[in-house]
Amino acid sequence: MTKTVVVVGTQWGDEGKGKITDYLAQSADIVARYQGGNNAGHTIEFKGKQFKLRLIPSGVFSAEKVILGNGMVINPESLLEEMAYLNEEGVSTDHIRVSNRAHVIFPYHIEIDGLQEELKGDQKVGTTKRGIGPCYADKYARFGIRIGDMMDKETFAEILKENIEAKNRLLARHGKPTFNFEELLEKYSAYAKQISPYVTDTSYELDEAFKSGKKVLFEGAQGVMLDIDHGTYPFVTSSNPSAGAVTTGLGVGPTKIEEVIGVVKAYSTRVGEGAFPTEIEGPNADRIREIGREYGTVTGRPRRIGWFDSVVVSHTRRVSGLTGISINLLDVLSGIDTLKLCTAYELDGKEIKFVPSTIREFERCKPVYEEMPGWHEGITGVSSYEELPVAAQNYLRRIEELVGAPIAIFSVGPDRDQTILMKQLF
Ligand code: GDP
Ligand code: IMO
Ligand code: MG
């Protein structure tokens, strides 16, 4: 029986990773997140309740322990707010562990995120403006402040002062609001105190879990097309959602990874800017957006809609080593006469089946489509593959074939119960 499973987004995020993580967490012991921050937004539904999570792993409802790994960037204010929200809903947060090596997002990161977008003008990324990029930039510039640093008031004061001085110089130069050291120190020292009971060496905790034979689910945020290395650079996020980042983002060896499940939306969506070859507008897009509730969890922006793109998901299969896929939101496609699937791109008169490395080339890619008949029956109540209309079965099988990874799960509605497991994972 498998002991570790990674859940990874295969497209541009919002594939329903939260739902699948919550579902699989019912049979896991530990759920650990390895990258990103509160740019993520997951909607989870069960027993007639709906939850929205950003920072806290979607396994929080079932796992005995949930970990926010060192590869994450953590806004302490958001973390505490999210904990309070869960507590109000009757969900315990005592089993949360936060890595002492994770980097901290401060208000100046958020201000700089906005400034950088402004300076980019029409080349803006369309970020979630949560300070994600500037925080990771500080990490790699070896200028960042980690959760562990906040735990010691003297050290914290010293590095926060240096950081604020540098950031204020930059912000003032652009006529932006600056930050008061004393105020920020006081506020964030109070946060540090509140968070301290949860802070630990999470790599050590995971090692202990492996030694005692626990089942561990690794939860990715965003999607591989937003990966800083493998996505549509520069219209990407600032971390590696790809499965490989589990190792560095949690301090776990690559030998520990067994199954990698890519979460696939039965069509495509994207929030923010950047090329999107299969994007559509018009009645089909509007229908999908309304039925699929395709509005951003974090920013409320309407998501851009497109047909399923097998070049994208095959790219993810390769760079993340998918051992299986979960096809979500299949129900949203009920009622569309003809479905289109992108099987290749035409780039400058040549047919290609890979994602080109530059955004200039990606922008010139035209989708090559094949068409399949759709189905009109509602499928939100099906509980097995056999109950699906034949056209829906064929659509799933064609995706499996085009991507080159077997279907492990499919999903026909937002609720935990509307999930069909095709392969036992834990
Ligand atoms: P994540 O960021 O990958 O966790 O995905 P989001 O939660 O941002 O977006 C997925 C949306 O689709 C949420 O509103 C989910 O409740 C919803 N959802 C997930 N799976 C299904 C499904 O199979 N059918 C339908 N109709 N909605 C789903
Ligand atoms: P989940 O986990 C969809 C997008 C933003 C923007 C780009 C960079 O819910 O799938 P950032 O704020 O990260 O610097 O923005 O990435 N983005 C997401 N899109 N789902 C997400 O997370 C996203 N997180 C970031 O819209 O285009
Ligand atoms: Mg989301």
Image: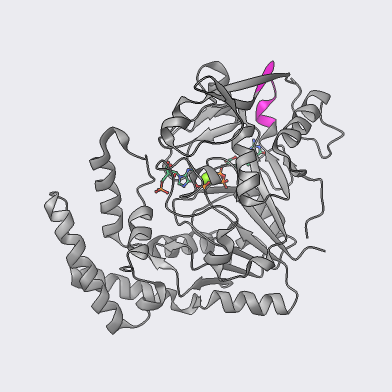
Residue 413 in the image: state x and y as whole percent: 68, 38
Please report the residue visible at 40 percent of the width from the left and 35 percent of the height from the top: 273
> Residue 214 occupies which quadrant of the picture?
bottom right
> Residue 162 occupies which quadrant of the picture?
bottom left
Please report the residue visible at 30 percent of the width from the left and 54 percent of the height from the top: 110
Question: Which region of the structure is painted magenta?
Answer: 331-340
Q: Taking 271 as reference, is 1 above or below it?
A: below
Q: Taking 283 as reference, is 93 above or below it?
A: below
Residue 340 in the image: state x and y as whole percent: 65, 21
The answer to if 108 sits in the magenta stretch is no
Residue 279 in the image: state x and y as whole percent: 52, 25
Q: Is residue 58 left or right of residue 200?
A: right
227 or 378, which lies in front?
Answer: 227
Q: Taking 370 as reference, is 130 above or below it?
A: below
Please report the residue visible at 53 percent of the width from the left and 19 percent of the height from the top: 349
Tell me, what colour scheme is on the image?
A: one colour
Q: Tag count in the figure?
A: 0
> Split into 4 quadrants, where in the image is the C terminus?
bottom right
**Residue 426 appearing in the image:** yes
Please report the residue visible at 74 percent of the width from the left and 26 percent of the height from the top: 378
Residue found at the very far right of the displayed protein:
386
Residue 240 in the image: state x and y as whole percent: 50, 54
**Residue 30 appearing in the image:** no
The answer to if 334 sits in the magenta stretch is yes
> Split into 4 quadrants, where in the image is the N terminus?
bottom right
